[in-house]
Amino acid sequence: MKQSNVFTRILPALAALAVVTGAISPALAQTNLLQDGGFEGMTMNQPDATWLTLGPGTANSDLPYWTTSTTNGWTQLNWGIQNSSNGYFPAAEEGSHYLNLVSHTYYDNANTASVSQSFAVTGGAQYLVSYYGAAREVSNKVRATMTFDTAGGGVYDSAELAAYSGGTPSDPWTLQSFTFTAPVGATLATLEFHAVTPTDWGYGVYLDDVLVTATSGNSSEYTAWANGTFANGATLSDKDPAHDPDGDGMTNQQEFAFGLDPTTGSSVNPISQQLDKTTGVFKYTRTKNSGLTYIYQSSTTLSEPWADFTPVTDPPATSISATVEEVTVGVPPLLLNESRLFLRVKAE
């Protein structure tokens, strides 16, 4: 199933002949399959720039829903803002809390501090895991391990994370993501995080805003677009495909599909040229290499069902920026003979 959303926006018709709409088919709800992915669920409170060391074992009462495991390192739940006394701890990426997974290999055990949570999956379905990471030392990484109640699994390392020390860089958090497909027959997945450090004594990694959503084959394209479009410091909520951070009535997924800008409310119209009755042509914009399929449909009533149509020729695309192209669509003459005609482009 494709990750997509619906929007219907009627644009002014030329000579009362045609209206072109941009549309995306019904959406999957972008619901986090994890509980407390931002580590904000604990009831206890402490002053900013302090921390609580979490013990190993079953789900910790100080960290609801997550299970901690510690051999030679430790797991800390950090509060709030940069620690002014040593500059080791950045501000939380979002909210008040984040995890510090402290691992070292002094005793030849790289997986020394971890946190994990299980969640329901559907066998054969694809999922997107996103999170923010930072580190205290150069070359540290977050390692995510997926296991299932059936056979199968995988290991997913982040890129080398920005090293934070003494307040530099001011925003060390970077968005990391990967996709996985649940094995056929699987009903339960477990996601575990721990630090990978290159030295005997490593101060590990910082982890915040973990999000797991059901997704589709275009997730990697969407993630690349979101990372390149939103400024550093944008939250996972800002980048969620179903959200509308600029408040223009269009979701990020819709703006992704049609080459629009999700950071400004003035970017709302993908129809760059209305239908010309004489030439039988209209134009629209879309994101290059989006991984989506674009379908052309017509109606004489604006009521369902809409009928698919094939353009007169393969719609040529002209590059108008590094990431956006303009597509020219020739409408079949038979449709142009209708006394009332509505057209739309659908991406899925």
Image (tube, rainbow, N blue to C red):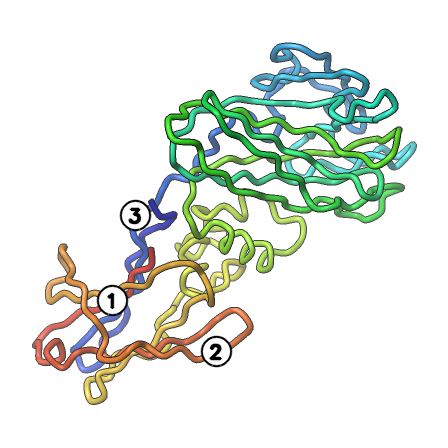
* Residue that badge 2 annotates: 319
Name the residue carrying label 1: 296
In this rendering, would 158 be left or right of 296?
right
In the figure, 270 relative to 205: above or below?
below
Residue 36 visible in rendering: yes
Q: Which is more toward the observer, 139 or 325?
A: 139
Instruction: For the N terminus, give its image quadrant.
Output: top left
Label 3, on which residue?
26
Q: Is residue 114 above or below residue 198?
A: above
At label 3, which amino acid type do we have? Answer: Pro
Q: Is residue 160 left or right of residue 282?
A: right
Res 35 seen here: no
Where 230 falls versus 207 (above or below)?
Answer: below
The residue under the point 55% across, 54% down is: 226
Disc nearest the viewer among 1 and 3: 1
Q: Spatial distance from mark 1 to mark 3, Cα to Cα?
A: 16 Å
Residue 201, by quadrant, is: top right
Q: Position of residue 147 (x, y in %)?
A: 54, 26
Which circle marks residue 256 in the picture?
Answer: none
Q: Position of residue 14 (x, y in %)?
A: 22, 80
Three-letter code for the amino acid on which mark 2 is drawn: Ser
| Dot 2 crowding, Cα within 10 Å, few <14, some 14–19, many 20+ | some
Q: Residue at x 16, y 60 (%)?
A: 306
Check if mark 3's residue and mark 2's residue have beta carbons within 8 Å.
no
Q: Report, in whole angstroms, how far the alpha carbon at label 3 lies from the one at label 2.
A: 28 Å
| 180 vs 250, nearest the viewer | 180
